[in-house]
Image: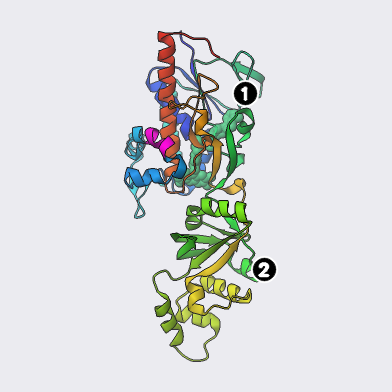
Amino acid sequence: MSLPFAVIGAGPAGLIAAETLASAGHAVVIFDQMAQPARKFLLAGRGGLNLTHSEPLEPFLARYGPAAEALRPAIEAFPPAALIAWAEGLGQEVFTGSSGRVFPRGMKASPLLRAWLARLEGMGVTLRRRHRWMGWDKSGALRFATPDGELRFAPAASLLALGGASWPRLGSDGAWAGLLADVAPLRPSNMGFCTEWSPHFASRFAGTPLKRIALRFAALIQRGEAMITAQGIEGGAIYALSAPLREAIARDGAALLHLDLRPDLDVAALSERLAGGARGLSLSNRLRKQAGLSPVAAGLVQEALRGGAAAPLETLIKALPLRLHGTQGLDRAISSAGGLRFAAIDGRFMLQARPGVFVAGEMLDWEAPTGGYLLQACFSTGVAAAHGMLASCSADAASPHLPA
Ligand SMILES: Cc1cc2nc3c(=O)[nH]c(=O)nc-3n(C[C@H](O)[C@H](O)[C@H](O)COP(=O)(O)OP(=O)(O)OC[C@H]3O[C@@H](n4cnc5c(N)ncnc54)[C@H](O)[C@@H]3O)c2cc1C
């Protein structure tokens, strides 16, 4: 009987790889260090589980920036339509929101995951929980720390799908970075930023959303929403700019973001509104009644004035400067940047330095904004790596070789 395949990491990348391998008729063992599989996938379900995005493939691929060409073959081979068909095959009908994002109708991950795990079990896939991968022994066998002591396992081929390093308490702690060569440092991505609020502003507005705003950083403009936090600001529009903001802070120590609190009005229209109305209105009332700002947006303008901003009100409302001096950490970032460099793997997602070992998912060196791009790349690379494993094993069967 032939050896089973090993998949290490029971997140979406590992589970879809296991399904692809089992569908081809192979025995598969999945290992994960946590007691429960796919903890981060379940957490993603709390935000509705944005599985993928409906935009055409070229703009879709452009979201991966410098990694787009490395990911292109995997995403073309298992594109958004394939991911949608797969989810629907598990009984999870999807819908496309007004932003083009695709979600399961139930807006949850748990029914999908339950159906998926049951399907894998039905295919004979074994899941070994609380097995922490620790590298290889001298013979090339995988080493695991388990509650019963160390286990060594020699598979036909193995897949590392260990995730990035955000939300480490859910299992993907990035500790694997110490076991592999050619890893770009793991950094937060799609995360919040730190700024200096006055105690008054922070205590009044932390946790308040800023709706229908636009953000400008250098030549980039992003419309959407953000959330005031005790330490700074986070949320969808901020995440979309998080990579360039993070790089600017690393380079210059700070980044200057501008908030447009009334993106639907131009400066002239705002100026006219602010000039009209009853005399003697307080500043707060002028901002709210004449400029139509929400209490938190008005609070931001007042915060800027207290900090010494001298521009006219209409200019501040259209371009409120916010100095970001740090990033929030990996603990609560949606994803991580950095990871195993594409130069370390071949076109089949196999480690150049270790034939028979494949890599997929967020642990590879790519990043993307939120919008379904993260899960799509995890699924597509999981499928591609599984096909690489199948191809390498049939090539080995045709002309056997000893592991390096
Ligand atoms: C709050 C939040 C919301 C999100 N929402 C979305 C969303 O709506 N849409 C979207 O596209 N993306 C979303 N994401 C991102 C998405 O969940 C991840 O990109 C995705 O889960 C990564 O999949 P993965 O399989 O590569 O790794 P993971 O899902 O991180 O799985 C890796 C697995 O490897 C295991 N592991 C790690 N190290 C070891 C080891 N040494 N030994 C054994 N096992 C190990 C871990 O326990 C884990 O189970 C969200 C993330 C967060 C935090």
Q: Are marks 2 and 1 in contact (CB under 8 Å)?
A: no
- At a point 52% along the width and 87% down the height, the residue shown is 281
- At a point 55% along the width and 32% down the height, the residue shown is 162
Q: Which residue is mark 2?
A: 199
Q: How many marks?
A: 2
Quick check: is 9 in the magenta stretch? Answer: no
Which of the 4 quarters of the picture holds residue 185? top right
* Residue 172 in view of the camera: no
Q: Position of residue 377 (x, y in %)?
A: 43, 38
Q: Position of residue 174 (x, y in %)?
A: 60, 36
* Residue 346 in view of the camera: yes
- At a point 62% along the width and 23% down the height, the residue shown is 135
Quadrant location of the C terminus? top right
Of tags 2 and 1, which is closer to the observer? 1
Residue 135 disc label: 1
Which three-letter amino acid code belongs to the residue tagged 2?
Pro
Q: Position of residue 134 (x, y in %)?
A: 63, 25
Q: Nearer the viewer, residue 117 or 190?
A: 190
- At a point 39% along the width and 33% down the height, the residue shown is 74
Q: Secondary structure at mark 1?
A: strand
Per the picture, the main secondary structure of the magenta-coloured stretch is helix
Using residue 331 as the reference point, say whether residue 395 is left or right of it.
left
Residue 198 disc label: none
Which three-letter amino acid code belongs to the residue tagged 1?
Gly
Identity of the residue furthest to the bottom in this view: 279
Find the distance from the CA under tag 2 to the CA under tag 1.
48 Å
Magenta range is: 69-75
